[in-house]
Amino acid sequence: MTLKIYLLDYTPDTIAWLNSEINPKFEADHPGVKVEITEGSWSGWDTTFSGFFAAGEGPDIINLGSEMNTLYGDSLADMEEFLGESAWPDIKNFGPALENAKFEGKIRGLPIFTAPRYVFCRTDLMEAAGWTTGTPKNFEEWVTFAEQASIIDPATNSLIQQALVPVDAGSMADWQWWLLVFYSLGGELYKADGSPNFDSAEALATTEFLFDMRQATYGPAMDAVGALPTGQGSVIDVNDETGEDNGAVCLAHSGWAAPPFTRPIWESISIDPFYGDPDNFPNSRPVVLAFNDWLAVAGYSQNKELAAEWLKVAFSREANNKWNETMGLIPARDDAQFGFVVESPQLQREAELASQFGVGFAGIKEAAKLSTIMQDALGKLVTEELTAQEVVDKIQSEYIDALN
C-alpha cells in the first residue's frame, strides 16, 4: 500500500528531513506501507487540485493554502474521528491556525505554519532618505514616504529605489496586499447577510490608497517609468557581488521574501504590522495578515486512517518545529515554538506580532475566482483604465455573479 502526499510548502532541507526521518519512522510502524511524496508547485495549483477532485483520485494528503478550506471543503475528509481531541489529545496544542484546517467546524487536516505579512523596513535607507519617524502609521505618511524615498534614474527612467514593495513590486496592486490594507481599516469582506462588501467606504479607501502609493512611487507618468530591476535574494537585502542594495526600502510580505536570518543586513531591518489609517477610519487596527498553509486529507482517499497516522508523526511537537526550521517560519503548534524560534530575535518579534495582530487569511468564498476578479480590476486601476470607484464597482458586481 502506498500513502501518497502532494507537497508545495518545502525546501530541499524539508524533503531531505521527511525522507530521512519522518517517512522511515512511519513505514517502520506500518509494515507494508510506503510513503510517496510528490513535490508540486504553487504555479497552476487550482488546475492541479481541481483535477484531483474531479477525477476522484490522486494524493491522499494535499498541501492547501489558507483560503482553500472553503474552496475545497466539500471534497475533503472529515477527520474528527482520527484527529479530534478524543482521538489525538495533541490537537489542543494547535493555535488559531487550526481554524484554517477546518470546514463546517470539522477538522480536515493540520496546519503547517503561520506566515503573516509584515512590514520589513531598512532603517538605514529610511534615514538616508530623510525619514526619521520609523514605519509609517497612516495613509498620509505612507504616501509622503513613497514620494520621499523612491528614486527614479533619469538616465534610464526606471526605479532604482522603491520606498515600498508590497508583494508585487511592479504593479503594487496585488490582491493580497489589498486585503491586508482593507482589514487594517476594520473592513469586513462580507456583510451581515453574507453578500460581498466591496461597495463599502473601506474598500474604496483601500483602492484609492493603492493607486496613490503607486503614483507616489512612479510619479505622474506611471506607465512610462520602468519597474525596479530584479536582484539576487530579498529586495531589501544587499547584493554580495556588487555591494549595492537590491532597491527596496520597505517590504510588505511574509518572511519568505525577507533575507535569511543569518544575513548581516538584519542589523538595519525593523519588523512592524501595517497600521491602517486611524485618523480617517476609527476602526483601524494594526494588522499582520496571517497565512496558515496546511495538509488536508482528500475525501476520495481510501487511506484516511493511515493519512491521520502520518500527520500525527509529521506534526508532533518536535516534527512541527523541525519542518518550520527548514523553512524559517513559525510553527502552527504553540508548543512547537522553541529552539530556532526563540533563538532568533526576528522570529520572536514575528511571533509576538502574529499573536497580537494576526488576522487569518481564511473563510474566503470562491477564493480563486475572487483573486482573478480582483487582479483584473486592480490591473486596470494602475493603468488608469478604471477609477478607484469603478474598480470596486466592478469587483462587487463580478464577485456577486461568481457566488451565485
Image (cartoon, rainbow, N blue to C red):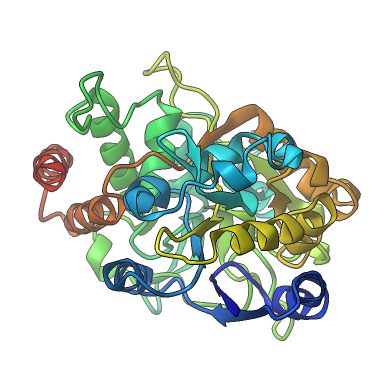
Against 370, residue 314 (above or below) is: below
Against 46, residue 108 (above or below) is: above
Against 62, residue 363 (above or below) is: above
Q: Where is residue 110 in the image (x, y as percent from the top left)?
A: 60, 50
- The answer to whether residue 366 of the structure is visible from this angle is yes
Q: Nearest the camera: 403 or 370?
A: 403
- The answer to whether residue 118 of the structure is visible from this angle is no
Q: Position of residue 228 (x, y in %)?
A: 45, 70
Q: Where is residue 326 in the image (x, y as percent from the top left)?
A: 76, 67
Q: Nearest the camera: 276 or 394?
A: 394
* Residue drawn 66% across the image and 52% down it: 128
Question: Within the image, what quadrant is residue 325 found in?
Answer: bottom right
Could you tell whether 151 is left or right of 392 in the image? right
Quarter holding the C terminus is top left
* Residue drawn 42% across the image and 75% down it: 58
* Residue drawn 87% across the image and 55% down it: 340
Could you tell whether 124 is left or right of 41 in the image? right
Q: Where is residue 103 in the image (x, y as percent from the top left)?
A: 42, 41
Question: Within the image, what quadrant is residue 4 found in?
Answer: bottom right
Quarter holding the N terminus is bottom right
